[in-house]
């Protein structure tokens, strides 16, 4: 069989370790100012200095020239709701009224498969425009919303994680499953989609208030029966929500303990928000390798609270960044970094740009137990990568013209960049987006 070999020249950046916990003997990243990425059959064959690697290419190999731009792994968004695309930027006074007023009526429309397919296509195109190549995605309660999503992502050849929302109480009748039907539909979808091509399934109880104990129990049983599936849900996002959980589950030690008692804290479990946690909760997350999806644009928009990076790091919790669209206000992981930076400042912490790019790539892959598959340019990893343009806008061009440090370059991209900074997106070595220039 002939190999499909492609080479890309540009400034190469990818991560090897968390910059917050690395030192000179364990560097956090590899940076090749004049670099070359070699992709064979959709996987990384080599990543390094152009001067060294160019000589290894067979004669006549085409080298795509992205000199002056950055080549880095595609971003990973670890918590996002595709059905909420059309209701992004809908005003409400906090989480619970926002769910009632906008979210539930919007999600009702996904009963219609054609509508679900239309939104899934737009959503995926928007992710790719923003340089996001993998996401952990909530569908709606309707199984057909999952089929529509995975069908669209399969057509694009993307590595995506998604699941059917389970909710059997405290929601409108038109969005309600039952403990039994929710588990049955989830199992059917796992069998249909999990590990089919690049699709991965996430068992998705929406959040504790909308599931009965029976539903959580069945979700936990599925999580044990299918240990390599993902789990995703919300936890400790908003104070009114936390008070509601205390009323609904008076015997639980804490909100996250509700999930713990049903066996839902384990590797590949992704908890959205994690704002109002206590020390024991953080310890349990670290012990069980459950991961936190930090959603700063959503938390600021809904007034939910400020994520505590320092306490999470002290406990050793697996961290990643997420948009949480439609509670989140941007699909761009660069804009998500911008807000994460400010959240950290308000909590008295400091997030270097290198750390933010780590959290949006390798940090997320580690949180999902997918290191080696996505998240960096390790040999054999899937070639999901982006071309980032430091001159995308007049202001970025002006700001990044002063040849300063890598940290300053990344910081300017995080604070000033958005979809315009993504010149192209590749998935498994195939170009899936190229920015239109006017
Ligand atoms: N909690 C339960 N459902 C949701 C949702 O759709 N968005 C957010 N941000 N929080 C939730
Ligand atoms: Zn959410």
Image (cartoon, grey):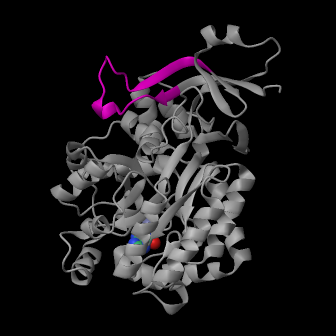
Whether residue 270 sits left or right of residue 187 in the image: it is: left
In the image, residue 87 sits, relative to residue 294, either above or below, namely below
Q: Nearer the viewer, residue 45 or 129?
A: 45
Q: Nearer the viewer, residue 408 or 370?
A: 370
Q: Nearer the viewer, residue 370 or 183?
A: 183
In the image, residue 151 sits, relative to residue 348, either above or below, namely below
Is residue 211 at all visible to an observer of this figure?
no
Please identify the quadrant where the N terminus is shown: top right
Q: Position of residue 364 (x, y in %)?
A: 44, 45
Q: Position of residue 244 (x, y in %)?
A: 26, 81
Is residue 93 inside the magenta stretch? Answer: no
Could you say which quadrant of the image residue 151 lies in?
bottom right
Q: Position of residue 251 (x, y in %)?
A: 18, 78
Is residue 228 at all visible to an observer of this figure?
yes
Residue found at the far front of this picture: 225
Q: Position of residue 78 (x, y in %)?
A: 47, 54
Whether residue 293 sits left or right of residue 165 in the image: it is: left
Determine the residue positioned at 52% across, 51% down: 332
Is residue 18 inside the magenta stretch? Answer: yes
Q: Start and end of the magenta stretch?
A: 13-36
Determine the residue positioned at 25% across, 73% down: 239
Determine the residue positioned at 42% across, 37% down: 358
């Amino acid at each position: 069989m002939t190999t499909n070999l492609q080479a890309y020249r540009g400034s190469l950046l990818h991560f090897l370790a968390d910059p917050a916990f690395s030192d000179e003997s364990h560097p956090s990243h590899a940076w090749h100012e004049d670099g070359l990425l070699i992709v064979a059959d959709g996987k990384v064959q080599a990543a390094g200095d152009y001067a060294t690697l160019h000589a290894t290419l067979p004669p006549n190999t085409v080298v795509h020239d992205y000199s002056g731009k950055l080549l880095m792994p595609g971003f990973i968004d670890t918590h996002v709701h595709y059905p909420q695309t059309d209701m992004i930027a809908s005003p409400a006074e906090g989480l619970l009224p926002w769910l009632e007023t906008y979210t539930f009526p919007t999600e009702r429309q996904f009963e219609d498969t054609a509508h679900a397919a239309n939104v899934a296509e737009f959503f995926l195109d928007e992710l790719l425009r923003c340089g996001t190549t993998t996401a952990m995605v909530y569908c709606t309660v309707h199984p057909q919303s999952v089929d529509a999503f995975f069908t669209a992502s399969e057509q694009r050849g993307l590595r995506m994680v998604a699941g059917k929302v389970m909710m059997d109480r405290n929601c409108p009748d038109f969005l309600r499953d039952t403990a039994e039907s929710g588990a049955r539909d989830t199992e059917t979808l796992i069998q249909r989609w999990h590990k089919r091509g690049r699709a991965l399934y996430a068992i998705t109880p929406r959040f504790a208030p909308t599931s009965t104990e029976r539903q959580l129990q069945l979700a936990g049983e599925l999580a044990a029966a299918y240990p390599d599936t993902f789990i995703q849900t919300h936890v400790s996002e908003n104070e009114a929500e936390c008070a509601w959980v205390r009323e609904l589950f008076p015997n639980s030690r804490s909100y996250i303990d509700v999930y713990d008692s049903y066996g839902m804290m384990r590797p590949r479990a992704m908890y959205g928000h994690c704002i109002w946690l206590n020390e024991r909760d953080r310890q349990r997350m670290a012990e069980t390798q459950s991961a936190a999806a930090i959603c700063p644009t959503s938390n600021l928009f809904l007034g939910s609270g400020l994520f505590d990076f320092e306490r999470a790091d002290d406990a050793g919790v697996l961290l990643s960044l997420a948009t949480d669209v439609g509670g989140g206000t941007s699909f761009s992981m660069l804009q998500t970094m911008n807000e994460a930076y400010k959240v950290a400042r308000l909590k008295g912490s400091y997030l270097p740009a290198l750390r933010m790019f780590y959290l949006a790539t390798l940090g997320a892959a580690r949180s999902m137990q997918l290191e080696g598959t996505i998240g960096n340019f390790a040999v054999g990893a899937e070639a999901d990568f982006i071309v980032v343009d430091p001159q995308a806008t007049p202001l970025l061009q002006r700001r990044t013209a002063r040849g300063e440090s890598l940290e300053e370059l990344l910081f300017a991209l995080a604070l000033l960049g958005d979809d315009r900074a993504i010149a192209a997106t590749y998935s498994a070595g195939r170009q899936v987006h190229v920015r239109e220039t006017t």
